[in-house]
Protein backbone atom coordinates (compact mmCIF):
# COMPACT_ATOMS: atom_id res chain seq x y z
CA UNK A 1 0.00 0.00 0.00
CA UNK A 2 1.26 3.47 -0.86
CA UNK A 3 1.40 5.72 2.19
CA UNK A 4 0.39 9.32 1.60
CA UNK A 5 2.66 10.45 4.42
CA UNK A 6 5.56 8.85 2.61
CA UNK A 7 4.78 10.72 -0.60
CA UNK A 8 4.85 13.96 1.35
CA UNK A 9 8.16 12.99 2.91
CA UNK A 10 9.59 12.14 -0.51
CA UNK A 11 8.53 15.47 -1.94
CA UNK A 12 9.95 17.32 1.03
CA UNK A 13 13.25 15.49 0.62
CA UNK A 14 13.25 16.09 -3.13
CA UNK A 15 12.73 19.82 -2.65
CA UNK A 16 15.73 19.91 -0.34
CA UNK A 17 18.03 19.02 -3.22
CA UNK A 18 16.07 19.78 -6.35
CA UNK A 19 19.11 20.35 -8.53
CA UNK A 20 21.39 17.90 -6.68
CA UNK A 21 23.93 20.65 -6.43
CA UNK A 22 24.68 20.52 -2.72
CA UNK A 23 27.85 18.58 -1.88
CA UNK A 24 26.87 18.44 1.78
CA UNK A 25 24.01 16.00 1.20
CA UNK A 26 24.39 13.06 3.52
CA UNK A 27 24.86 9.56 2.16
CA UNK A 28 22.79 6.68 3.50
CA UNK A 29 23.44 5.82 7.15
CA UNK A 30 26.19 3.30 7.75
CA UNK A 31 25.14 0.23 9.70
CA UNK A 32 27.65 -1.66 11.81
CA UNK A 33 26.61 -5.13 10.66
CA UNK A 34 29.03 -6.88 8.32
CA UNK A 35 27.32 -9.04 5.72
CA UNK A 36 28.95 -11.46 3.31
CA UNK A 37 28.55 -10.36 -0.30
CA UNK A 38 27.38 -12.66 -3.07
CA UNK A 39 28.43 -12.00 -6.64
CA UNK A 40 26.50 -12.57 -9.86
CA UNK A 41 28.80 -15.50 -10.60
CA UNK A 42 27.96 -17.10 -7.22
CA UNK A 43 31.36 -16.42 -5.61
CA UNK A 44 31.46 -15.22 -2.01
CA UNK A 45 33.99 -12.59 -0.93
CA UNK A 46 34.59 -10.39 2.08
CA UNK A 47 32.25 -7.44 2.33
CA UNK A 48 35.17 -5.04 2.45
CA UNK A 49 38.28 -6.48 0.84
CA UNK A 50 39.43 -9.17 -1.55
CA UNK A 51 42.32 -11.54 -0.88
CA UNK A 52 44.65 -9.09 -2.60
CA UNK A 53 43.76 -6.44 -0.04
CA UNK A 54 41.96 -4.23 -2.54
CA UNK A 55 38.51 -2.98 -1.61
CA UNK A 56 35.81 -5.24 -2.96
CA UNK A 57 33.73 -3.52 -5.68
CA UNK A 58 30.22 -2.70 -4.51
CA UNK A 59 31.01 -2.29 -0.83
CA UNK A 60 30.41 0.97 1.00
CA UNK A 61 34.14 1.54 1.45
CA UNK A 62 34.74 0.99 -2.26
CA UNK A 63 31.91 3.38 -3.09
CA UNK A 64 33.43 6.06 -0.87
CA UNK A 65 36.90 5.54 -2.36
CA UNK A 66 35.52 5.84 -5.90
CA UNK A 67 33.27 8.82 -5.12
CA UNK A 68 30.08 6.87 -5.85
CA UNK A 69 28.13 7.68 -2.68
CA UNK A 70 27.87 11.44 -3.12
CA UNK A 71 24.27 12.33 -3.97
CA UNK A 72 25.51 15.01 -6.37
CA UNK A 73 26.88 12.19 -8.53
CA UNK A 74 23.37 10.94 -9.25
CA UNK A 75 22.33 13.80 -11.50
CA UNK A 76 20.77 12.81 -14.82
CA UNK A 77 21.12 15.03 -17.88
CA UNK A 78 18.03 16.60 -19.41
CA UNK A 79 18.57 14.39 -22.46
CA UNK A 80 18.61 11.23 -20.32
CA UNK A 81 15.43 12.27 -18.52
CA UNK A 82 13.77 12.90 -21.87
CA UNK A 83 14.80 9.46 -23.14
CA UNK A 84 13.29 7.92 -20.03
CA UNK A 85 10.07 9.82 -20.66
CA UNK A 86 10.02 8.73 -24.31
CA UNK A 87 10.57 5.13 -23.19
CA UNK A 88 7.65 5.21 -20.76
CA UNK A 89 4.98 3.90 -23.14
CA UNK A 90 7.19 1.00 -24.25
CA UNK A 91 7.77 -0.05 -20.65
CA UNK A 92 4.07 0.24 -19.91
CA UNK A 93 3.40 -2.33 -22.62
CA UNK A 94 6.12 -4.58 -21.18
CA UNK A 95 4.52 -4.27 -17.73
CA UNK A 96 1.20 -5.37 -19.19
CA UNK A 97 2.92 -8.33 -20.86
CA UNK A 98 4.60 -9.32 -17.61
CA UNK A 99 1.29 -9.14 -15.76
CA UNK A 100 -0.29 -11.37 -18.40
CA UNK A 101 2.53 -13.90 -18.01
CA UNK A 102 1.98 -13.79 -14.26
CA UNK A 103 -1.71 -14.53 -14.74
CA UNK A 104 -2.82 -11.07 -13.67
CA UNK A 105 -5.04 -8.48 -15.31
CA UNK A 106 -3.01 -5.94 -17.27
CA UNK A 107 -4.46 -3.22 -15.03
CA UNK A 108 -3.33 -4.95 -11.84
CA UNK A 109 -1.50 -2.94 -9.20
CA UNK A 110 2.19 -3.29 -8.42
CA UNK A 111 3.32 -6.41 -6.62
CA UNK A 112 6.64 -7.90 -5.60
CA UNK A 113 6.08 -10.47 -8.34
CA UNK A 114 5.96 -7.71 -10.94
CA UNK A 115 9.28 -6.26 -9.74
CA UNK A 116 10.82 -9.74 -9.74
CA UNK A 117 9.57 -10.33 -13.27
CA UNK A 118 10.80 -6.95 -14.53
CA UNK A 119 14.29 -7.48 -13.11
CA UNK A 120 14.64 -11.05 -14.37
CA UNK A 121 13.19 -10.20 -17.78
CA UNK A 122 15.61 -7.31 -18.24
CA UNK A 123 18.67 -9.36 -17.23
CA UNK A 124 17.71 -12.03 -19.77
CA UNK A 125 17.33 -9.33 -22.41
CA UNK A 126 20.78 -7.87 -21.65
CA UNK A 127 22.44 -11.28 -21.74
CA UNK A 128 20.64 -12.09 -24.99
CA UNK A 129 21.72 -8.83 -26.58
CA UNK A 130 25.35 -9.18 -25.51
CA UNK A 131 25.44 -12.66 -27.06
CA UNK A 132 23.88 -11.22 -30.23
CA UNK A 133 26.47 -8.41 -30.36
CA UNK A 134 29.39 -10.81 -29.91
CA UNK A 135 28.06 -13.07 -32.65
CA UNK A 136 27.65 -10.21 -35.11
CA UNK A 137 30.66 -7.91 -34.78
CA UNK A 138 30.46 -6.67 -38.36
CA UNK A 139 29.99 -2.93 -37.86
CA UNK A 140 29.82 -0.30 -35.13
CA UNK A 141 26.10 0.43 -35.30
CA UNK A 142 24.15 -0.85 -32.33
CA UNK A 143 20.46 -1.58 -32.75
CA UNK A 144 18.47 -2.84 -29.73
CA UNK A 145 17.50 -6.49 -30.04
CA UNK A 146 14.00 -7.82 -30.47
CA UNK A 147 14.38 -11.23 -28.87
CA UNK A 148 11.25 -12.75 -27.35
CA UNK A 149 11.61 -13.36 -23.60
CA UNK A 150 8.81 -14.47 -21.31
CA UNK A 151 8.74 -14.44 -17.55
CA UNK A 152 8.39 -18.23 -17.62
CA UNK A 153 12.07 -18.46 -18.65
CA UNK A 154 13.33 -16.29 -15.81
CA UNK A 155 12.79 -18.38 -12.66
CA UNK A 156 16.52 -18.95 -12.09
CA UNK A 157 17.20 -15.21 -12.26
CA UNK A 158 14.34 -14.50 -9.84
CA UNK A 159 15.65 -16.98 -7.29
CA UNK A 160 19.15 -15.51 -7.47
CA UNK A 161 17.90 -11.94 -7.09
CA UNK A 162 15.73 -12.98 -4.15
CA UNK A 163 18.90 -13.76 -2.16
CA UNK A 164 20.27 -10.26 -2.70
CA UNK A 165 16.94 -8.63 -1.89
CA UNK A 166 16.58 -10.63 1.31
CA UNK A 167 19.98 -9.42 2.56
CA UNK A 168 19.14 -5.81 1.70
CA UNK A 169 15.72 -6.02 3.37
CA UNK A 170 17.25 -7.42 6.55
CA UNK A 171 19.85 -4.67 6.61
CA UNK A 172 17.56 -1.72 5.86
CA UNK A 173 14.59 -2.89 7.90
CA UNK A 174 10.90 -3.26 7.03
CA UNK A 175 9.90 -1.30 3.94
CA UNK A 176 6.34 -0.88 5.17
CA UNK A 177 7.48 1.61 7.82
CA UNK A 178 9.83 3.43 5.42
CA UNK A 179 7.51 4.07 2.51
CA UNK A 180 5.67 0.87 1.73
CA UNK A 181 5.41 -0.10 -1.94
CA UNK A 182 7.44 2.87 -3.17
CA UNK A 183 10.34 1.85 -0.92
CA UNK A 184 10.06 -1.73 -2.11
CA UNK A 185 10.31 -0.60 -5.74
CA UNK A 186 13.42 1.47 -4.99
CA UNK A 187 15.09 -1.52 -3.33
CA UNK A 188 14.22 -4.01 -6.07
CA UNK A 189 15.38 -1.59 -8.75
CA UNK A 190 18.62 -0.96 -6.85
CA UNK A 191 19.46 -4.66 -6.80
CA UNK A 192 18.59 -4.95 -10.48
CA UNK A 193 20.83 -2.01 -11.42
CA UNK A 194 23.82 -3.59 -9.65
CA UNK A 195 23.04 -6.98 -11.13
CA UNK A 196 22.92 -5.51 -14.63
CA UNK A 197 26.26 -3.75 -14.10
CA UNK A 198 27.80 -7.11 -13.28
CA UNK A 199 26.79 -8.52 -16.65
CA UNK A 200 28.81 -5.77 -18.33
CA UNK A 201 31.71 -6.02 -15.88
CA UNK A 202 31.99 -9.75 -16.57
CA UNK A 203 32.31 -9.05 -20.29
CA UNK A 204 35.03 -6.46 -19.63
CA UNK A 205 37.01 -8.68 -17.28
CA UNK A 206 36.37 -6.44 -14.27
CA UNK A 207 35.83 -7.65 -10.72
CA UNK A 208 32.14 -8.07 -10.11
CA UNK A 209 30.20 -5.83 -7.74
CA UNK A 210 29.27 -7.39 -4.44
CA UNK A 211 25.77 -7.06 -3.04
CA UNK A 212 27.01 -5.89 0.34
CA UNK A 213 23.86 -4.30 1.83
CA UNK A 214 25.63 -1.20 3.16
CA UNK A 215 27.03 -0.51 -0.28
CA UNK A 216 23.72 -1.34 -1.94
CA UNK A 217 21.90 1.20 0.19
CA UNK A 218 24.41 4.03 -0.15
CA UNK A 219 25.29 3.55 -3.82
CA UNK A 220 22.17 2.12 -5.43
CA UNK A 221 19.02 2.67 -3.34
CA UNK A 222 19.81 6.37 -2.97
CA UNK A 223 20.56 6.53 -6.70
CA UNK A 224 17.09 5.16 -7.54
CA UNK A 225 15.44 7.79 -5.37
CA UNK A 226 17.50 10.59 -6.87
CA UNK A 227 16.70 9.46 -10.42
CA UNK A 228 12.99 9.43 -9.60
CA UNK A 229 12.99 12.85 -7.92
CA UNK A 230 14.60 14.41 -10.98
CA UNK A 231 12.16 12.73 -13.33
CA UNK A 232 9.15 13.70 -11.20
CA UNK A 233 10.22 17.34 -11.16
CA UNK A 234 10.15 17.50 -14.98
CA UNK A 235 7.53 14.98 -16.05
CA UNK A 236 5.32 14.51 -13.02
CA UNK A 237 5.08 12.17 -10.06
CA UNK A 238 4.39 8.46 -10.24
CA UNK A 239 0.70 7.65 -9.88
CA UNK A 240 1.43 4.53 -7.84
CA UNK A 241 4.15 1.95 -7.21
CA UNK A 242 3.65 0.26 -10.59
CA UNK A 243 4.08 3.61 -12.30
CA UNK A 244 7.25 4.21 -10.27
CA UNK A 245 8.65 0.85 -11.42
CA UNK A 246 7.87 1.75 -15.05
CA UNK A 247 9.51 5.18 -14.72
CA UNK A 248 12.76 3.88 -13.23
CA UNK A 249 12.91 0.99 -15.69
CA UNK A 250 12.24 3.34 -18.61
CA UNK A 251 15.32 5.34 -17.60
CA UNK A 252 17.37 2.22 -16.96
CA UNK A 253 16.37 0.64 -20.26
CA UNK A 254 17.82 3.59 -22.16
CA UNK A 255 20.96 3.61 -20.00
CA UNK A 256 21.45 -0.09 -20.71
CA UNK A 257 21.07 0.45 -24.45
CA UNK A 258 23.82 3.05 -24.23
CA UNK A 259 26.00 0.60 -22.29
CA UNK A 260 25.35 -2.07 -24.90
CA UNK A 261 26.43 0.35 -27.60
CA UNK A 262 29.59 1.19 -25.61
CA UNK A 263 30.32 -2.49 -25.08
CA UNK A 264 29.97 -3.14 -28.78
CA UNK A 265 32.51 -0.40 -29.51
CA UNK A 266 34.79 -1.75 -26.80
CA UNK A 267 34.69 -5.23 -28.33
CA UNK A 268 35.28 -3.80 -31.80
CA UNK A 269 38.00 -1.28 -31.02
CA UNK A 270 39.18 -2.03 -27.47
CA UNK A 271 39.46 1.68 -26.69
CA UNK A 272 36.52 2.53 -24.43
CA UNK A 273 35.87 2.22 -20.71
CA UNK A 274 32.55 2.01 -18.90
CA UNK A 275 32.07 4.55 -16.14
CA UNK A 276 32.14 2.50 -12.92
CA UNK A 277 35.71 1.48 -11.90
Image (spheres, rainbow, N blue to C red):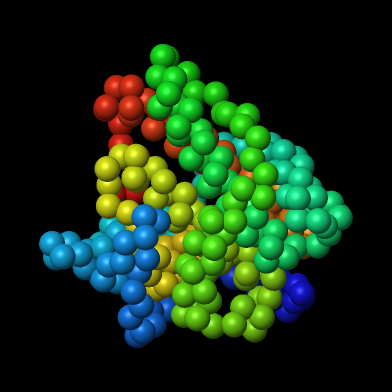
Give x and y (percent) for residue 180: 68, 75
Locate residue 224, reporting x and y percent. 54, 59
**Residue at the outermost left position:** 52
Residue at 63%, 69% in the rendered image: 184
* Quadrant of the rendering where the N terminus is positioned: bottom right
**Relative vertical location of residue 152 with respect to residue 213 in this rendering, above or below:** above
Q: Is residue 52 above or below residue 276?
A: below
Residue 241 image point, x, y percent:
72, 63
Residue for point 64% across, 52% down: 118
Q: Position of residue 168 (x, y in %)?
A: 48, 73
Task: Indicate the quadrant where residue 274 lies.
Answer: top left
Residue at the (35%, 85%) spot, across then down: 32
- Look at the picture and state if 195 lies above or below 215: above
**Residue 223 relative to residue 179: left or right:** left
Could one spot residue 68 in this view of the protein? no
> Which residue is nearer to you in this view: 20 or 242?
242
Q: Quadrant of residue 275?
A: top left
**Which residue occupies 45% across, 34% down?**
130
On screen, residue 191 versus residue 235, left or right, reads left
Residue 75 visible in rendering: yes
Q: Residue furthest top?
A: 138
Left or right: where 121 falls relative to 21: right
Report the label total. Answer: 0
In the depicted view, which residue is nearer to us: 38 or 107?
38
Amino acid sequence: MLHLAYIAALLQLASAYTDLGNDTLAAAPVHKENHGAVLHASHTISATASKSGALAPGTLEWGVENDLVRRTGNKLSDAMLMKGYENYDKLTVIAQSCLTDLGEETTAAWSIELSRAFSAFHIKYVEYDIARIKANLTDDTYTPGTGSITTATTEEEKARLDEYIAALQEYMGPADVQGGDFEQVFRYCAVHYADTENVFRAELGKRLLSFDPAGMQAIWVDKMKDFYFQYAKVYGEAKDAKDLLIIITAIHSWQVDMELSSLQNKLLYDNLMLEIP
